[in-house]
Image (tube, rainbow, N blue to C red):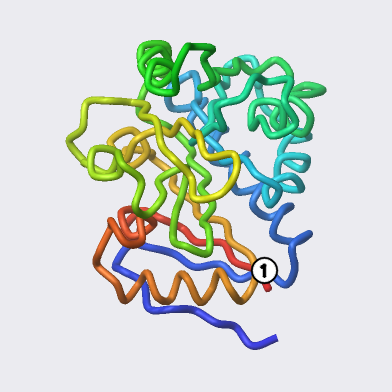
Amino acid sequence: MAIFEPKLAEGMAWKTWNNAAEQARGLAETVADALREALIERGRALLVVSGGRSPVAFLEALSGAVLDWSKVAVSLADERWVPESHPDSNAGLLRRHLLKGAAAKAQFIGIYQPAASLEEAAEKADRYLHELILPIDVLVLGMGDDGHTASLFPGSTNLVEALDPAGTRRCLPMWAPTVPHQRLTLTRAVLQGARVQILAIQGESKLATLSQALSDNDDQRMPINAFLRSPLSIHWCP
């Protein structure tokens, strides 16, 4: 297979995997190694991952990693505004595919909050997320075909505030262009401070989106742009 490697900013890295299974295993090993390093250096580790269907194989592989999970905190880059029991819940996804076996000892810090409105839920989540001991040690992001990452969607009402690198909010309400519309997302100010930053993508369409983003400097049009700089490592497979 021909190896494709786009032109990246200085300090960024690119890894091509042969297929999704290899990517999941390799990504799990990379993340586990980074968590072990954080445990050695800090005595604890904070992992933030993305939800959706694409990360399932990676989460399953990571759940079997040998490390002191009791000293690891796990959170989400974003969440749908639904309770954990809902099939679309990212928290529920983590419970099923990551936080099991030895990994069940990890501390889970969720984003969903019951409230009368999405805005109130985001305010409650923002206060709750102050339990996160920053910086994030390992961040694993995904990317949509529209250039969104986490729930930082192009055109969303709060996108300017959410992408402010000096913002003071940890969580903001966001609106997705597809159902379910209501989302909660960590902000750029929180995400960009991660010590290890990984973007995991699959397929030719995501590669085309990434190529477009790399030539586009508008974070509002393609929010992934806010993260396409050092120390990001991109893991791609066909």
Quarter occupied by the N terminus: bottom right
Residue drawn 56% across the image and 62% down it: 235
Q: Is residue 206 above or below residue 79?
A: below
Q: Position of residue 97 (x, y in %)?
A: 77, 34
Q: Is residue 81 above or below residue 194?
A: above
Which corner quadrant of the image does residue 211 belong to?
bottom left
Residue at 59% from the left image edge and 66% from the top image edge: 236
Quadrant that contains the C terminus: bottom right
Residue at 40% from the left image edge and 46% from the top image edge: 152
Q: What is the residue that sits farthest to the bottom in this orientation?
A: 2
**In this picture, residue 33 sits left or right of residue 25:** left
Of residue 161 and residue 44, the one placed in the foreground of this image is: 161
- Disc 1 designates what residue? 17
Counting from the top left corner in percent of width and height, residue 138 is at 49, 38
**Residue 152 appears left or right of 89:** left
Q: Is residue 80 left or right of residue 133?
A: right
